[in-house]
Image (cartoon, grey):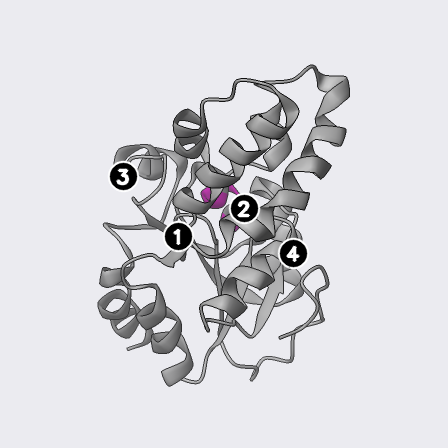
Amino acid sequence: MTSPNTARTPGGPDAPLTVGFDLDLTLLDTRPGIKATYEAFAAEVGVAIDADLAVTRLGPPLEHELAYWFPQERVPEMAARYRSLYPRHAIGPTVPMPGARDALRAVHETGGRTLVVTAKNGPHAALHMKHLGMEPDELVGGLWAEGKAEALRAHGARVYVGDHTGDVRGAAAAGALSVAVATGPCSAEELREAGADVVLTDLTDFRAWWEGYRA
């Protein structure tokens, strides 16, 4: 796996088909760990934060959520403090989403490559994947919504799988097929309205879709 915040130029026309995946609530259920981190963070900084509410809004960068709880000028400082607690509290409780391991396996079984593109910072995303033994071929962190197109284009991804309308927009900006899973904060209807090309209930449906797509 390459460095979590870098991208490389894709190969030529005969290069393996690359499929991109979002992380939070697409591949991994990070809610228990993120909730635990928010609770520890709130106790440390002495600010009341509704951790249960925060984990219903996963998808955008951390700074978006912190702006609900702190003045804008304090957000960078608070983000750094939150991230310092993240490895201790968030990695252990995180589990794969249903079908996630099989979805990555399905791509690899057909000679494809897997790419994770996430708004989460790259080092923490890499820690999650390594801890669960689900290391993708490539991983890029720190990108959100249309910004994800940068990595998708750089790695030649033709498909991007995500759970948020921001992921749909990122796929569209990259000219990639948008495959959405209704496992995050956005409903299937919202994902369709945002322009998703395919909407799956969850990743347990991915293999059957992928086999049809590849046929």
| Mark 2 and mark 3: Cα distance apart in space | 17 Å
Of mark 2 and mark 3, the one earlier in the sequence is 2
Of mark 4 and mark 1, the one earlier in the sequence is 1
**Quadrant in which the N terminus is drawn:** bottom right
Q: Is residue 49 magenta?
A: no
Viewer-side label of 1, 2: 1
Above or below residue 57? Residue 27 is: below
Q: Main secondary structure of the magenta part?
A: helix
Viewer-side label of 3, 1: 1
Q: Which residue is mark 1?
A: 26
| Mark 4 and mark 1: Cα distance apart in space | 16 Å
Task: Indicate left or right for 164 with 205 as reference.
Answer: right
Residue type beneath disc 2: Gly
- Tell me where residue 65 appears, x and y as whole percent: 56, 27
Q: Which residue is mark 4?
A: 122
| Mark 3 and mark 4: Cα distance apart in space | 28 Å
| Mark 3 and mark 1: Cα distance apart in space | 13 Å
Residue type beneath disc 1: Thr
Q: Residue at x 40, y 57 (%)?
A: 27
How many residues crowd around disc 4 within 10 Å: few (fewer than 14), some, or many (20 or more)? many
Above or below residue 174? Residue 6 is: below
How many residues crowd around disc 3 within 10 Å: few (fewer than 14), some, or many (20 or more)? many
Give SS at disc 2. Answer: helix
Q: Is residue 170 magenta?
A: yes
Q: Which residue is mark 2?
A: 170
Of mark 4 and mark 2, the one earlier in the sequence is 4
Q: Which residue is mark 3?
A: 188
* Chain part drawn in magenta: 167-171
